[in-house]
Amino acid sequence: MSQVTFGKITLPHGLALAPLAGVSDRAFRRVCRACGADFTVSEMVSAKALCYEQRKKDPKNRSVSGQLASVMADELPMAVQIFGSEPDFMAEAARMIEANEYIGCVSEVPPSAIDINMGCPVRKVTANGEGSALLKNPKLIGEIVTAVVKAVSIPVTVKIRAGWDRDSVNAPEVARIIEASGAAMLTVHARTREQMYEPGVDRSVITAVKNSVSIPVLGNGDIYTAADALSMMTETGCDGVMIARGAMGNPWVFSEICAALDGRDFAMPSAAERFEVALTQVREMIAEKGERVGVAEAKKHLSWYCHGMEGAAAARSRLMQAVSYDELASILREMGGKA
Ligand SMILES: Cc1cc2nc3c(=O)[nH]c(=O)nc-3n(C[C@H](O)[C@H](O)[C@H](O)COP(=O)(O)O)c2cc1C
């Protein structure tokens, strides 16, 4: 029904987990896939940092960007997202990621696609002309996409915003350039950079992009329920949807949408069941990053999993004090037992 195909990849329900810096790590990507996301995107990786890290002589082979870019076979199909503004660095980073040739690489396989970030609104990124700042320079967008497409054999996808600000909404024009430069799929976050994440998206921009290109278009912005996803698809004609904040603490949003698309009923798992999934995620985070970092990073995820439940505020402050997996697990299991 909402099947999306690009390159050799088919997304049966057209459902993607968005790239989320500090959130869409492998453990969370796996949980979202298990809940029904067809496709996931890594946290953004700086193309320049990845390239520069190759020049360091680190005997321990440590590389922050290298860790972020690594891909395991069981998480396909997924894309590694890169950001930057220089076509040469972007092309070289993409080539290294596809070839699994970089310091810190623990990949079993290449990613299914390379995604290019043209939406990040953070000042530290846009000040370098990267992320959403690229929307002010459509010519450079064409050069970057062309260079990356040439450097890899896997599909290249791009994620854009509506435009830089309300006076320069240019997503349809940018989308045409991206398609002409060889990209295989496009995601549109229907806010301008100026709007950052403020409530309300302009879905008409997604409609306009969809009418401007023939590659698949994923609609993104404020999807929290199956009703939101279905209305996004019917109102805009987009081929599928990408979800970011709506999946944080609620990966079952994907299960709910799959059920709605298939005409099945959906029942939310019980709190105790949800917390067991959350704890599986935490164990994977710890296996990958070690207990200290894993526990520290898990706290925000677990707070999201508690969202809206009775006693969530008290549980959150206990979670924040916890220093071990066992502590996190006992707080959650106590709460799950009461729910
Ligand atoms: C914590 C956080 C981190 C994000 N990191 C990225 C990123 O690394 N790359 C990117 O293209 N977008 C990033 N985004 C933007 C999201 O992918 C998405 O476009 C945006 O949140 C709108 O979707 P939503 O309304 O479903 O949250 C991030 C958003 C949030 C809230």
Image (tube, helix red, strand yellow):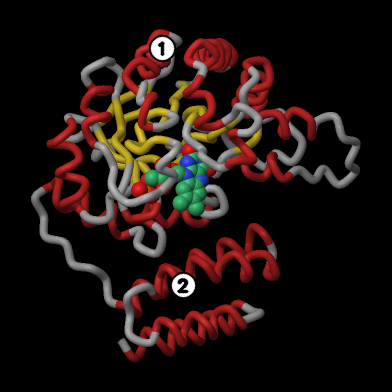
- Judging depth in this view, the residue of 209 and 154 nearest the camera is 209
What distance separates the C-alpha of mark 1 from that of mark 2?
41 Å
Task: Name the quadrant containing residue 31.
Answer: bottom left
Residue 147: % across, % down? 58, 12
Residue 20: % across, % down? 49, 48
Q: Which residue is mark 2?
A: 303
Of tags 1 and 2, the one toward the viewer is 1
The amino acid beneath tag 2 is Ser
The amino acid beneath tag 1 is Ile
Task: Name the quadrant containing residue 159.
Answer: top left
The answer to whether the residues at label 1 and label 2 have Cβ atoms under 8 Å apart is no
- Determine the quadrant in which ligand 1 lies: top left
Instruction: Report whether residue 217 is seen.
Output: yes
- Classed neighbour count for the residue bearing mark 2: other residues with Cα under 10 Å, few (<14), some (14–19), many (≥20): many
Residue 37: % across, % down? 34, 47
Residue 244: % across, % down? 39, 49
In the rendered image of this protein, does residue 90 appear above or below residue 286? above
Whether the residue under disc 1 has CB within 8 Å of ligand 1: no
- Residue at (27, 55) in percent of width and height: 224
User: Under tag 2, what secondary structure?
Assistant: helix
Q: Which residue is mark 1?
A: 177
- Residue at (30, 60) in percent of width and height: 252
